[in-house]
Image (cartoon, rainbow, N blue to C red):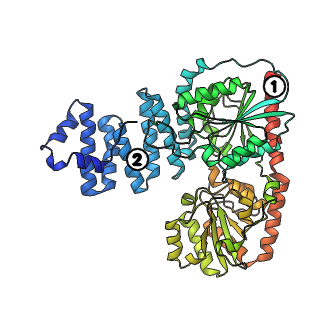
Amino acid sequence: MARLVTLEQVAADSPWETLAPGLVESWLKGPDDEKKIQAVLIAASQLFKQSGASRALDFLLYSRWLLHCHPLPVMHNILWLCNRLGLEQTAAHTCLDFARDAFRMNYVELGLEAASAALILDAQADYEITKSPARSAEVAALYEQVASSLLPNSTPPARTARAGGPLRIALLVPNLVDHVVAYTRRLLNIVRYADPQKYRLRVYVSENHAVRTSPLFPCGCVEGTTEERGPATLAELRSAGVAVYLGPRQLRFGEAAQHLARQMEQDGTEALIVQSGLSAPIDWLAARIARIPVKTAIHIGSSLFLPDFDATFYDNPSNIERENACWPATGGARQVVQTGVDVKSLDAQQAFSRDRFGIPADAVVIGTLSNHLERRLSEPYLQIIAEALQKHPQAWFLAFGSAALPDKMAFFARWGVEDRVRFGGKQSQSGAALKMLDIYANEFPVGGSNSVLEAMTCGCPTLAMKWSLVHAESAGAEWVGDPFCIPGPDATAYAQRLDQWLCDKPLRRQIGQALRQRILDRFSADQYVAAVLDSVSQLVESKIG
């Protein structure tokens, strides 16, 4: 990627007052595209200096109509300004516009990186792209343009009959981490509970979200590698005899997808189970072009909208209803399979000591666990928590998943309750954290899903509200179920329920026991794994015998 500079550097390199009168205007109206871009940046730098970041951003967004696209130097500054202003959602939509323009001009690899960045930024904001099945399907259509050119190069052809022995299944994910992430936990559950006499599993990690060796686009894939972030997970997989493929980060997305697809083919894969989102185009393309007899996906909040697929497994029926209108004709069957949690693993974990966090033994601890606390600790949610702490002096709030967040602590300080708020950091032993809590208060509008199941497993009374049909705004309530969930977007009911539970220890114990029994009856990991793998086996049997 060429060196890109910010508006501050543009202003230093080309001070407005040193330019001849009318020069910038003449460049904007002239035929030289490079001069036009330079003129836009100089004008934006002057706006930034005189009127602030917001005015400069408005001008750069408008410049798409002057330049017929946002060239990379302009896009770089849009992202820079959005970051300064906390406008991740604006950045996400603009990245997607950039991706469309890049595809239109045949800069395919640049377009793939921009589309990935759009979905990553969307997840850091309000999920406006992810929430919209129509917008998500548009992203999938962009990826299909690339897949169409790669499909002829995908070899060998699919087999017509099985060779016998355990069914060879590929488990495809964008990355693996040691802290609590739903698709990593789900993958480990499949490995732990799959019958090795019936299934031979291999794990394929695209590393799509890890920082690239030489990126084309100035935003997006910035995470650490699986080896850096998931060493314990890798060790468990390898100790179980499961081979793990780690995708090369030096290849462009399209090349990496071809490499991954060829590897799955060469390994004799008979069935694919992919757990990825549209933020991982390597995974999407590899799944699309690989010549594998049976292809399935596990829905992780938004569908991949992949054509020529055999099945997608949903754990939240709301998602099927939400995506009905955009489901591709060849997208395959959609099957609801109750998700599962590893009860044995959680039961084996001992609760952390409250002394570790400076919390009294007799406190009533409200808590949550999430990798996205910065976004999920919404103001309406925090207000209910703060009011509860203010009303109940014995109540404390403990949030796992991050170090202390200054803006959230400042919120609690305004209510005078910050001395009873703690942040517990990222967790790899979620059971030890959750067993400290007296009440699990799921965030809203966007809340957790896997952490809700784990809290229920730990016998924790779990408060969850169904805000909408969107997965992240409904899954927690689906798992808790009637009569314990709040069935609609009703913050008053949520606050009243929390207040009731804070005052009634026997009721908390009764609800916690009922929710744990619900897990044992409906959400065990072994049952989930058996249901998914049985369905995959049946698909293989029907297609290749």
Contact check, label 2 and label 1, Cβ < 8 Å: no
Q: Secondary structure at mark 1?
A: helix
Q: Residue at x 15, y 40 (%)?
A: 23
Residue 251 vs residue 368: left or right? left
Q: Quadrant of residue 290?
A: top right
| Quarter of the figure with the C terminus | top right
Task: Give, as a three-letter code, the residue at label 1.
Answer: Ser
**Looking at the image, is mark 2 or mark 1 earlier in the sequence?**
2
Residue 215 vs residue 516: left or right? left
Q: Residue at x 26, y 57 (%)?
A: 51
Question: Spatial distance from mark 2 to mark 1, Cα to Cα?
Answer: 49 Å
Which percent across, then down, holds residue 448?
65, 56
Kindly tell me whether residue 315 is visible in this rendering. Answer: no
Residue under label 1, please give it: 542
Q: Residue at x 27, y 32 (%)?
A: 33
Residue under label 2, please give it: 79
Which percent across, then down, holds residue 186?
73, 46
Kindly tell me whether residue 288 is visible in this rendering. Answer: yes
Q: Residues within 10 Å of mark 2 (few under 14, many from 20)?
A: many
Q: Residues within 10 Å of mark 1 (few under 14, many from 20)?
A: few
Q: Quadrant of residue 76?
A: top left
Task: Give, as a three-letter code, the residue at label 2.
Answer: Leu
| Quarter of the figure with the N terminus | top left
Front position among marks 2 and 1: 2
**Front-most of residues 180 and 55:** 180
In the displayed structure, 335 sits above or below 486; it is above
**Front-most of residues 149 and 135:** 149
